Image (cartoon, helix red, strand yellow):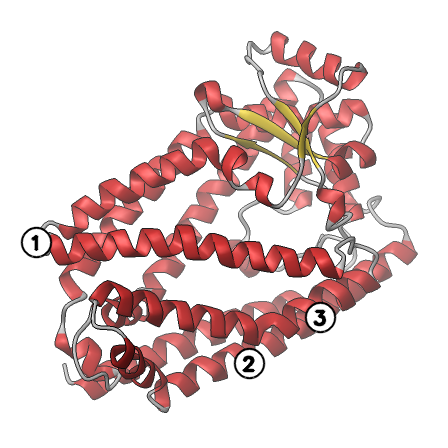
């Protein structure tokens, strides 16, 4: 294979992925005004449904704009040797290979993030504000961004530096040593994410004693679920949208409820949402996801180890010499189709897990309460209740609401 052929393969992958998502979004948008299915026809009244349609159309147009912009940006970098230019520039200032790679990816990330800032600002303070969701202040927006950057420098930069050190020190054994490290890192993050990362952005407080906590504890006892940590997170400081999630396992497991969830649902509906999350735990979904993610990481790193040092990679981008960062960048482009395929498969499995968690909530609590909670949350967030099947297949980690309700009613 020549460098020119490889270059055009990269271009083709990027363009085809964009076209695939463009077509998916186009057909999905054609269903925005469909008549609501029987299972969800009571979610919106006529005025609310028109509002939800306007919300979906607004984000569709916004997504088309940002998608086209990002495509042109990446193509410009490829056609005008932007990556080669940056590689030459960082080599003028650093000699250490790890520092060169950190600088290369750091400049790319921060430059892109700064370019994307107007889009992020518009989504938060124009679109979300217009439809009544935004609670983020401009101060919070800026502070969140600065914290995210700091976190990326410390954690992201640290992980990248360690991986490259493995590559330079153990070239033949790089992939499996890196695999062990990333697997261990992922396990630690899953166990302690809520304690280490979440507090940087949100305040978490234990759920106060009262009827809601009593009902949760009563349910947990009934299903033999040892519950030690129930926290309420101040999601309302950024958005009116509600959520709940389960993290960790063993002694580190905890349930986190958004304050907006508690405000939007009655106590029985909150317990039903909790029952769904307990269902994930009882079915060991967190462990299965960790194992599958680890296996995918191992396969990816093995493929990377076979390809990263190929001179043709750097030549395809007109870089002057092979390097870890150029090899990683080109591999990332070439891995796109595999990533899309594995993403579809993981979403398929995730949707199956969601049905299982719903079934658990139905069997151990009441299906009606979970149905009501799902309808309320969809209403509050102006969810798309008529998604195109192809969009669901490609992008949905959760089944559409109508399908979840059908399953709960069976």
Q: Residues at badges 2 and 3 in contact (C-beta under 8 Å)?
A: no
Of label 2 and label 3, which has the lower sequence position?
Answer: 2
Pick the residue in front: 253 or 404. 253
The crowd level at tag 2 (other Cα within 10 Å; few <14, some 14-19, many 20+) is: few
Query: Where is residue 308, by image quadrant?
Result: bottom left
Q: How many marks?
A: 3
**Can the viewer see residue 300 in this picture?**
no
Q: Which residue is mark 2?
A: 69
- Residue 92 in the image, given as x and y percentages of width and height: 26, 81
Q: Residue at x 80, y 66 (%)?
A: 54
How would you rate the neighbour count of disc 3 (Cα within 10 Å): few for under 14, some for 14-19, many for 20 or more? few
Q: Is residue 336 left or right of residue 256?
A: left
Q: Is residue 233 visible?
A: yes
Foreground label between 1 and 2:
1
Q: CA distance from mark 1 to mark 2?
A: 40 Å
Say whether residue 377 is left or right of residue 336.
Answer: right
> For mark 3, what is the residue?
122
**Whether residue 319 is situated above or below residue 207 in the rendered picture:** below
Residue 4, how many percent across, how many down? 22, 88
Residue 62: give its label.
none
User: SS of the residue at dot 1?
Assistant: loop
Label 2: state its secondary structure. helix
| Mark number, residue 172 | 1
**CA–CA distance between discs 1 and 3?**
47 Å
Q: Are marks 1 and 2 in contact (CB under 8 Å)?
A: no
* Quadrant of residue 242 within the rendered picture: top right
């Amino acid at each position: 294979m020549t460098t020119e052929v490889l270059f055009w393969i990269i271009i083709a992958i990027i363009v085809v992925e964009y076209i695939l998502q463009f077509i998916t979004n186009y057909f999905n948008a054609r269903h925005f005004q469909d008549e609501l299915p029987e299972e969800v026809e009571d979610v919106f009244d006529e005025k609310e449904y028109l509002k939800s349609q306007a919300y979906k159309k607004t984000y569709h147009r916004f997504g088309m704009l940002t998608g086209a912009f990002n495509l042109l940006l990446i193509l410009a970098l490829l056609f005008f040797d932007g990556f080669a230019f940056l590689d030459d520039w960082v080599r003028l200032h650093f000699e250490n290979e790890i520092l060169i790679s950190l600088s290369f990816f750091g400049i790319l990330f921060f430059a892109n993030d700064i370019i994307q800032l107007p889009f992020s600002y518009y989504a938060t303070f124009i679109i979300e504000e217009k439809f009544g969701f935004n609670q983020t202040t401009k101060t919070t927006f800026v502070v969140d961004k600065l914290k995210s950057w700091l976190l990326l420098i410390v954690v992201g930069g640290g992980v990248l530096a360690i991986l490259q050190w493995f590559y330079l020190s153990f070239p033949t054994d790089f992939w499996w040593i890196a695999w062990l490290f990333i697997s261990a890192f992922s396990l630690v993050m899953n166990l302690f994410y809520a304690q280490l990362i979440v507090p940087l952005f949100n305040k978490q407080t234990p759920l106060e004693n009262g009827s809601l906590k009593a009902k949760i504890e009563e349910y947990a006892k009934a299903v033999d679920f040892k519950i030690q940590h129930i926290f309420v997170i101040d999601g309302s400081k950024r958005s009116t949208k509600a959520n709940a999630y389960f993290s960790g396992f063993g002694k580190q497991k905890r349930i986190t409820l958004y304050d907006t969830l508690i405000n939007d649902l009655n106590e029985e509906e909150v317990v039903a949402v909790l029952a769904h999350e307990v269902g994930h735990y009882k079915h060991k979904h967190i462990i299965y996801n960790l194992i599958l993610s680890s296996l995918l990481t191992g396969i990816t790193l093995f493929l990377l180890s076979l390809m990263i040092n190929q001179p043709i990679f750097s030549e395809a981008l007109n870089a002057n010499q092979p390097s870890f960062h150029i090899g990683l960048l080109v591999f990332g482009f070439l891995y796109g189709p595999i990533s899309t395929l594995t993403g579809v498969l993981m979403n398929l499995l995730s949707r199956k897990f969601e049905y299982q968690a719903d079934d658990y909530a139905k069997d151990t609590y009441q299906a009606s309460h979970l149905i009501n909670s799902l309808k309320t949350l969809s209403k509050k967030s102006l969810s798309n209740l008529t998604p195109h099947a192809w969009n669901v297949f490609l992008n949905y980690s959760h089944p559409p609401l109508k399908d979840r309700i059908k399953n709960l009613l069976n």
